[in-house]
Every structure is written in structure tokens, then in C-alpha cells.
Image (cartoon, grey):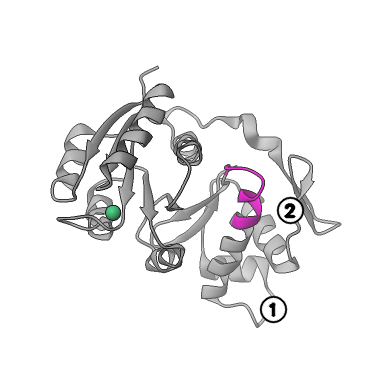
Amino acid sequence: MTSPRILIVEDEITLAEVIRDYLLSNGMEVDILSEGTHAVETALEKAHDLIILDLMLPGVDGLTICRKLRQNSDVPIIMTTAKVEEIDRLLGLEMGADDYVCKPYSPRELVARVRAVLRRRPLGGQPPDKGLDARLHIDQERWRATLDGDDLDLTRREFSLLAALAARPGRVFSRDQLLSLAFPDDTEVFDRTIDSHIRNIRRKIHSKTDWDPIRSVYGVGYAYEG
Ligand code: CA
């Protein structure tokens, strides 16, 4: 099996080099760009398997790079940003990144996120790793979701949403579809509320593991990829 090839676009050189060393020691190949000007061309030419893209960059910023890449490629992108509030804004823009990581992050955490994204979007069209299937258990009768046997402490709405997604793995749902599937009689849930419930579910899952079974789908909505 070939090694995943990762592009790091990051103007903090020391940070980029630390991440590179972690990725190298995890059997990945790594290129670094310290500014944004040629990021899109480099990523498309060299066919990277994943891009770690900083938001604030000299030259062209991460937002513009992400959008341009998405016009031509579905290469997995992990956006990094110095402000946690930026992540909410970026999610709202639905720019199509696969994951968002707030600085300062630990290199180990970032590598775990890289592995998780690669697992969901495997190289060379191989089937995804199904070994994690049984991690999440949805108990419809008790309105309870457990991860590795641990209660996620979801609210009713969070539970309904996760259950609706997990009932049809891999299928992409729009926010409207999720509204009618998960909350048919709940008139206080709206499009944008879906995003905040998803964020809360992810936060609860992330408090226990780096695994993220919910995929944001650019311009559309969400899919469960457990
Ligand atoms: Ca930066």
C-alpha cells in the first residue's frame, strides 16, 4: 500500500516542521508550503491525499484556497485556525473542509484527525475501514447513544438527529431532510439549529475520542460515515 501524501500549508514554519515530523513517523509523505500563493496549483499537480490548511496565510488565505480547490477536487482538507469562533463561522460558510482544528493543537491530536479523515476517504478507492462500526450504539427505546459503551449524554434533539443520520450510513442528508426526519413534530428546530446540534454531538463524541462519524458535505448537509 502506498503512503498517504500530505500537503501542509502553514506559515508558522516551526509548527509545520513539527507536524511534518509526526506525519513522517506515521508513515506518511509530506510537503510544506509556507504561504498560500501556489497552494492550489501544488495540491492539484501533486495529487496530495490530504491537505492541512491554515486559515491565515501570507499570499492567498486558506478560505480562498479551500474554495478554489473544491471547484476542482474533493481532496480531503483539514482547516486549522487560531480562533475557535472562526470554526463556527467557517462551518456556516459551508466551504467544504472535512475537518476543522483550533490552535494550539497537539501534534498527536492533529495526526489522529488526519488518520480519521483518511479512514473516511480512503486512498485508491478502497472500502473504508469497517472495524469501527460497532463503536456507536443507538438505543431507540431508551433514547440513549453510547460510544464504546460510554453514554454520550445526548439531549433528546441531539439523539434524534444522530439516530436519523446513523440509520442510513453513507447517505447524505440536507438540513431540510434532517429536520423532517429527526424532528417531524418539533416546530422550534430550524435549518441553522441542525448545525449547532451537530456541533454539540461532535463535541460530545470528541470528548471521548478523535473519531468523528459525522461528515459535513459541502453545500448540502451531513452524512453518517461510521
Ligand atoms: Ca497562519
Q: Is residue 206 magenta?
A: yes
User: Crowdedness of circle 1 by 10 Å Cα count: few (<14), some, many (20+)?
Assistant: few
Residue extent of the magenta highlight: 203-211
Q: Is residue 196 magenta?
A: no
Quarter of the image containing the C terminus?
Answer: top right
SS at mark 1 in the image? loop
Q: Position of residue 19 (x, y in %)?
A: 37, 36
Work out whether 38 lies above or below 175. Answer: above
Work out whether 151 lies above or below 175. Answer: above
Q: Nearer the viewer, residue 25 or 162?
A: 25
Query: For mark 1, what is the residue?
Result: 186
Q: Residue at x 45, y 67 (%)?
A: 85
Q: Position of residue 16 (x, y in %)?
A: 31, 39
Q: Residue at x 67, y 71 (%)?
A: 183
- In this view, which residue lies farthest toward the right? 142
Q: Is residue 188 visible?
A: yes
Q: Amino acid at mark 1?
A: Asp
Q: Residue at x 64, y 34 (%)?
A: 132
Q: Earlier in the sequence, mark 2 or mark 1?
A: 2
Q: Where residue 152 is drawn, which disc sits there?
A: 2
Q: Mark 2 to mark 1: distance in Å? A: 22 Å
Q: Residue at x 27, y 56 (%)?
A: 62
Quarter of the image containing the N terminus?
Answer: top left
